[in-house]
Amino acid sequence: MGPELEPGLGDVSAPARLADPGEGISREELALATRNHGLPLEALRYDVTPPGLHYVLTHYDIPETDAARWRLRVGGLVREPLSLDLDALRSLPALTVRVTMECAGNGRALLSPRPVSQPWLVEAVGTADWTGVPLRSLLAAAEVGAEAVEAVFTGSDHGIERGVEQDYRRSLPLGVATGADPPVLVAYAMNGGPLPPQHGHPLRLVVPGWYGMAHVKWLREITLTDSPFTGFQQAQAYRLRQTAADPGEPVTRIAPRALLTPPGFPDFMSRTRVVRPGPVRVAGRAWSGHGPVTAVEVSADGGRTWSDAVLGTSDGDHPWAWRRWHHVWTAVPGRHLLTARATDAQGGTQPLDQPWNRGGFANNLVQRVAVVCVDDAGPA
Ligand SMILES: Nc1nc2c(c(=O)[nH]1)N[C@H]1C(S)=C(S)[C@@H](COP(=O)(O)O)O[C@H]1N2
Ligand SMILES: [Mo]
């Protein structure tokens, strides 16, 4: 628990607010939305998201970091505590893994009532090639004690959330932290270059298949513990609750989702897509943290009737990255709602009616894209 705070900075016993019926996006939500940008959806066309287009979510400030003096400490229940600088980490055997990362709050602003927080629509996603040291080799070198059950990861960013002053901190069960498939990484490179400031420079955790909150940025410490971590980001935030009193289940792996690369061209204000009559190639990406995507279906009537999309060749080299899909739709003049729906290897799929939980987490409602088909959109 943090020190006593000024009134107005919140209270851990008070849950995050729900917007009143019909309440618009507030200035506070707008302030978060301008800091934490999404993927411009046309960037779904790239296998690996180009620099600057990957979504960003930072709870507090991007901290000032100095790679030359950075140390990663591994301590707690270990026989050989480690303190490694970047050169030492770079000299260890490394892996590069292509990972699609998605914020657990993606889709939140479409929920009703709306949980008041970062107001994502559907764009909190991106894919990068992350290079780093497998966490399991660091933990092996540190000789984790038999009593350890979790690894707690501390970032060097600092802030207050609902009255609790904290460094950003999350844990993983030891079995996940030491897993080989997927390999959890302590990453120092993104797409072949140093991590950019907003993505965790100089070090971050990457947990393939898990929602973004697990991928701790600006990583400075790993602590092995003999009891589950009960810090704010684990026990208060990132739980699937129906009511504030409900202890809820923790948010973990990414639910399946498909998104469309926006077809045609946009109307500036409404973002409605404009297409010409005739065959329109509808394409996009689909992903899941519960195993590969096995099917994508497309609907041009908002989800009443469906056609199978063609999946891109399964890329065995990148099992933790999104998969391409496409479908040819014959557009006729008028208004249409294009929708896509992914199914994964475990049979998980996407709902047509929005599921709801208090934090707006792990919501994978199908995307609905308004399209108008016209011969001519009007004067230039
Ligand atoms: N230290 C730290 N790590 C963090 C966060 C943070 O605020 N601080 N945000 C988390 C959340 S909620 C998400 S969705 C991802 C976003 O990673 P990105 O900004 O690189 O896309 O980082 C996670 N790691
Ligand atoms: Mo997130």
Image: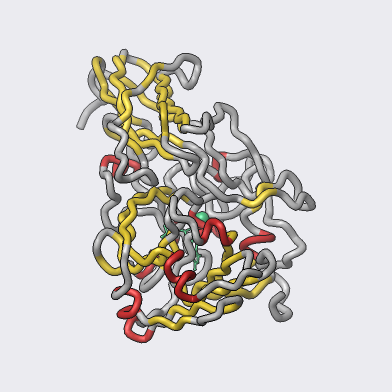
Outermost residue, left side = 380
Can see residue 12?
A: yes
The residue lying toward the viewer, choosing from 223 and 270, is 223
Q: Residue at x 61, y 63 (%)?
A: 233
Quadrant for the N terminus, please: bottom right
Colouring method of the image? secondary structure
From the viewer's perspective, tell me whether residue 289 is left or right of residue 321. Answer: right
The residue lying toward the viewer, choosing from 300 and 312, is 312
Quadrant for the C terminus, please: top left
From the viewer's perspective, tell me whether residue 316 is left or right of residue 366. Answer: left
Residue 29, percent across and down?
Answer: 54, 56
Q: Residue at x 43, y 23 (%)?
A: 337
Q: Residue at x 22, y 28 (%)?
A: 379
The residue lying toward the viewer, choosing from 377 and 228, is 228
Residue 301, percent across and down?
Answer: 44, 17
Query: Looking at the image, is 51 positioned above or below residue 372?
Result: below
Q: Residue at x 37, y 71 (%)?
A: 201
Residue 21, percent across and down?
Answer: 67, 40
Count all numbered tags in the image, as a single digit: 0
Query: Looking at the image, is 170 positioned above or below residue 343?
Result: below
Can see residue 156?
A: no
Name the quadrant containing residue 321: top left
Residue 148, percent across and down?
Answer: 63, 68
From the viewer's perspective, tell me whether residue 59 is left or right of residue 331. Answer: right
Outermost residue, right side = 245
Name the quadrant containing residue 307: top left
